[in-house]
Image (tube, helix red, strand yellow):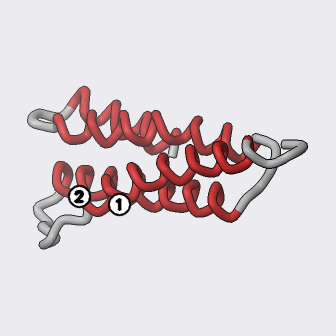
Amino acid sequence: MGAAGVALGAMGAHLPNASNLSVASSFLLFHAPALLALEAANGRSRLRTAGELAMLVGSILFSGALALDSLTTVKISPSPAPFGGVLLIFGWLLVGASFLVRRGKPGA
């Protein structure tokens, strides 16, 4: 995700009318370190794992749809970008909930 974010950012800086590439790049670059940090954090839970998976799939769908739209003439209808965005929001909510649930447990 980090490498793809850098690559899309570079393309967005050099290609005309590629503002969607900058957005796609930003989303990948924000979520790559977040997922690495979550993976390194102590204490696994199904809730957090589900949140991480939602963030990963959401990032791929959202950024992939924006990149595909900017770099090709291929149009997917309906676009997977909104669904990816919803998955990203849901993933963050799940991750946050997992830490709240964990914090409420004795010895956590």
Seen at 25% across and 34% down, the residue is 12
Residue 55, position as x, y percentages in the image: 48, 53
Amino acid type at image mark 2: Pro
Q: Residue furthest top?
A: 13
Nearest the eye: 10 or 20: 20
Which numbered disc, 1 or 2, marks the residue that appears first in the sequence?
1
Q: Position of residue 93 (x, y in %)?
A: 48, 49
Q: Nearer the viewer, mark 1 or mark 2?
A: 2
Residue 16 to residue 72: above or below: above
The residue at which mark 1 appears reads as: 61
Q: Where is residue 107 in the image (x, y as percent from the top left)?
A: 90, 43
Compare residues 15 and 19 and report the one nearer the observer.
Answer: 19
Q: Which secondary structure, mark 2?
A: helix
**Which residue lies at the image location 58% right of the left edge and 63% below the top edge?**
50
Q: SS of the residue at dot 1?
A: helix
Left-right relation of 100 to 45: left
Q: Nearer the viewer, residue 21 or 81?
A: 81
For the C terminus, give its image quadrant: top right
Amino acid type of disc 1? Leu
Q: Which residue is drawn at 60% across and 44% down?
A: 35
Q: Which residue is drawn at 25% across and 58% down?
A: 81
Residue on which disc 2 sits: 82
How many discs mark residues in the rendered view? 2
Q: How crowded is mark 1: few (under 14 residues within 10 Å), some or many (20 or more)?
A: many
Furthest toward the bottom, the residue is 77
Contact check, label 1 and label 2, Cβ < 8 Å: no
Residue 43, position in %: x, y?
81, 49
